[in-house]
């Protein structure tokens, strides 16, 4: 509500010329509609969780899965979470359809066809079931083998899982949904390679992804670690930005590597996983938690559900702290690009990306502190201009 009220009908002076009156009014409508829709989704989600809790359906489902699997720890847990996962997917599907084909379509962003949407849903379902199923199987087997001490080894398993995803996401997951092609020879590749050489950054893998199949929004990202790292440019970004602006955006990403932000955030993720598993170990075999969920006896599944609910406020606090660090890192990465004389180009590129996405220009400061992993456009512009004057 605070964030909605902070939306300004008047364009900030710093961004005069960025939007014309009609385009800015469209941005305000887009923000308001997304804000209202998000409130509806959140309210519906909370209501469903309350119904599940007060009706004792978590406990009923646990008893039923244990009964039909002859009280097998592994199979009852997998069946329990498999049913919850599929139920959640069915619950979320109408909201995703409305968001994609109504809201995003109404404002000219959606390029996804019904066929592509269905294929994406099925692929996502398959990947989630396989990866989630394998990871949950290993964790449950460790619990059955080691008891309450399982969490230390389970931490190691999840950390390895995170590292593998970081290294091979673009090679294993992305090809299921998008086509990636090496950036061809030409001015853009020459300028990117020239900057990488100037900044002392080894970069051989530059790919273009067909993001325009689904949306008109522009993006770019780095993925992988070590020799596996690659830069991925959305074709929409190449269409919207000049060569210098694209180089500036990539200079920002290279700045993250140069300042070791990728490694830093990986360490933070590891510490967060450690904290979660440690706290989870304290909820195991707790009869009060099981009864609160409608169960008559403790189980691994009910312990995990109760932990996930109880961890929510703790996760909010850790999320705020992580976002503080992330915003600091974004400023450092911007500064890195600025040191190579790319401040103006970066500002210009960020403005174009923001306009194209109809992003909110005036979020409430408290909302930014709690939820934003990046500083706002105005904050980044102010820092870059301040650095340029020094």
Image: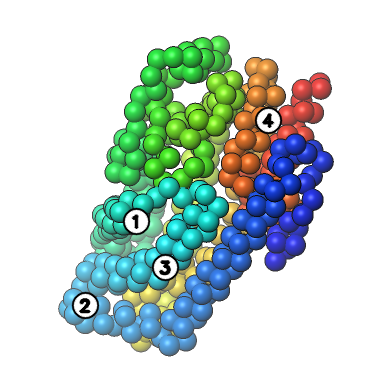
Location of mark 2 (residue): 71
Mark with earlier residue (3, 2): 2
Label 1 vs label 3, nearer the camera? 1
Q: Residues within 10 Å of mark 4 (few under 14, many from 20)?
A: many
Secondary structure at badge 2 equals: loop
Residue 146, disc: none
Q: Position of residue 324 (x, y in %)?
A: 66, 46
Location of mark 4 (residue): 347
Location of mark 1 (residue): 114
Mark with earlier residue (2, 4): 2
Q: Residues within 10 Å of mark 1 (few under 14, many from 20)?
A: few
Q: Residues within 10 Å of mark 2 (few under 14, many from 20)?
A: some
Label 2 vs label 1, nearer the camera? 1
Residue contact between numbered discs 1 and 4, judged by CB atoms under 8 Å: no
Secondary structure at badge 3 equals: helix
- Image side of residue 4 versus residue 225, left or right: right
The N terminus - image quarter: bottom right
Q: Quadrant of residue 62?
A: bottom left
Secondary structure at badge 4 equals: helix
* In front of the other: 146 or 245: 245
Mark with earlier residue (4, 3): 3
Vertical side of 292 occupied by 177: above or below: above
Residue in the picture at 49% in, 54% down: 105
* In front of the other: 95 or 339: 95
Residue in the picture at 77% in, 34% down: 382
Residue in the picture at 19% in, 80% down: 68
The C terminus - image quarter: top right
Vertical side of 211 occupied by 99: above or below: below
Residue lying farthest to the front in this orientation:
22
Residue 94, disc: 3
């Amino acid at each position: 509500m605070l964030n909605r009220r902070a939306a300004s009908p008047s364009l900030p002076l710093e961004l005069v010329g960025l939007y014309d009156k009609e385009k800015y009014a469209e941005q305000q409508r887009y923000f308001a509609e997304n804000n209202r829709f998000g409130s509806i989704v959140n309210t519906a989600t909370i209501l469903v969780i309350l119904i599940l809790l007060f009706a004792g359906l978590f406990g009923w489902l646990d008893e039923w899965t244990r009964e039909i699997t002859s009280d097998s720890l592994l199979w009852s847990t997998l069946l329990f979470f498999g049913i919850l996962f599929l139920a959640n997917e069915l619950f979320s599907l109408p909201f995703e359809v409305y968001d994609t084909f109504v809201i995003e379509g109404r404002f000219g962003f959606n390029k996804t066809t019904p066929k592509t949407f269905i294929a994406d849903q099925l692929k996502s379902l398959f990947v989630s079931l396989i990866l989630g199923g394998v990871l949950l199987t290993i964790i449950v087997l460790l619990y059955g083998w080691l008891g309450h001490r399982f969490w230390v080894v389970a931490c190691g398993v999840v950390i390895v899982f995170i590292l593998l995803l970081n290294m091979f996401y673009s090679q294993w997951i992305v090809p299921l949904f998008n086509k990636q092609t090496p950036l061809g020879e030409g001015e853009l590749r020459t300028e990117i390679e020239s900057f990488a050489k100037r900044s002392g950054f080894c970069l051989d893998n530059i790919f273009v992804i067909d993001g325009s199949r689904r949306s008109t929004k522009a993006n770019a990202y780095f993925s992988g670690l070590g020799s596996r790292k690659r830069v991925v440019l959305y074709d929409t970004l190449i269409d919207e930005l000049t060569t210098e602006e694209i180089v500036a955006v990539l200079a920002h990403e290279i700045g993250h590597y140069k300042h070791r932000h990728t490694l830093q955030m990986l360490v933070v993720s590891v510490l967060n996983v450690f904290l979660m598993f440690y706290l989870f170990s304290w909820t195991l075999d707790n009869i009060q938690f099981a009864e609160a969920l409608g169960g008559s006896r403790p189980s691994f599944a009910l312990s995990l559900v109760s932990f996930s609910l109880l961890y929510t406020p703790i996760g909010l606090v850790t999320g705020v702290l992580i976002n503080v660090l992330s915003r600091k890192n974004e400023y450092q990465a911007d500064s890195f690009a600025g040191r190579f004389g790319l401040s103006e180009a970066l500002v210009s590129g960020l403005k174009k990306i923001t306009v194209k996405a109809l992003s909110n220009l005036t979020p409430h400061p408290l909302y930014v502190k709690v939820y934003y992993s990046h500083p706002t456009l105005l904050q980044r512009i102010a820092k870059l201009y301040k650095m340029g004057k020094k």
